[in-house]
Image: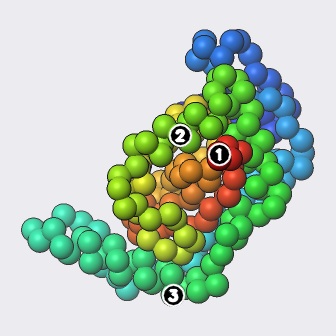
Amino acid sequence: MHGPLIVVLWLAGLITFAGSPDDGLCVPQPSSTCDAAAIGEFTARVHEYLRVRQGAARGLPLERPFDDPAVPLALRKALRQAIRDARPGARVGDLFTPGAAAAFRHIVAATAAAHGVDPKDLVRELRAEREPGAKHPSVNRRYDWRLGAWMWPALLHVLPSLPEDLQYRIVDNDLVLVDLQASLVVDILEDAMTADED
């Protein structure tokens, strides 16, 4: 619950990391007003995506309990296709603009340093839990849940908060923005974890 407040204070440069990596504290390093502006731009683009999504979903039945389990899957697929049709030119960086990308990478690096975590180790562990045959994410395509649904809690506490239908996921070195209801990849921040491996 304190994540958004921490981010605001951090972006304002009012708080710094405190304590040792093992004490459970996760308070980011001070950042610049450029980072704050970039996060604001990201948030504005998230809201623009939601506006497009709402228009695309107009006329589709609402999700609700059904006797036939195939019906919700069909509705999810219909929503995903409607959003894709509304964003035919969607590509990497539409929401994670260059400025936002730099700010997010700063957040990831600062959080890893505060917790004494090597991003390479985290990426390696996530890869080990991936189910066979999982497809790498691509913007405006279905998110393959065989990639995993876990997200590093310490990072979630300091990333900009999202509306309930959107979530972050770490896939390899990338931070992926996923529309949960549509199982759709909205955007990808490449090399967010700076964990290149041989």
Residue at label 3? 85
Identify the secondary structure beneath mark 3.
Answer: helix
Q: Residue at x 55, y 70 (%)?
A: 138
**Distance (Cα) linking label 2 and label 1:** 9 Å
Q: 97 or 172, which is in the foreground?
A: 172
Q: Residue at x 51, y 81 (%)?
A: 84
Q: Could you tell me residue 177's position as x and y percent?
A: 56, 59
Answer whether labels 2 and 1 touch (C-beta < 8 Å).
yes
Please identify, in this view, whether the residue under mark 1 or under mark 3 is nearer the observer.
1
- Which is in the foreground here, disc 2 or disc 1? 1
Few, some or many C-alpha atoms within 10 Å of disc 3 (few <14, some 14-19, many ≥20)?
few
- Residue 107 appears in the picture as rendered: yes
Say which of 114 and 51 sits in front.
Answer: 114
Precedes in sequence: disc 1 or disc 3: 3
Res. 24 image quadrant: top right
Amino acid type of the residue that numbered disc 2 sits on in the rendered structure: Arg
Residue corresponding to mark 2: 124
Q: Which is closer to the viewer, label 3 or label 2?
A: 2
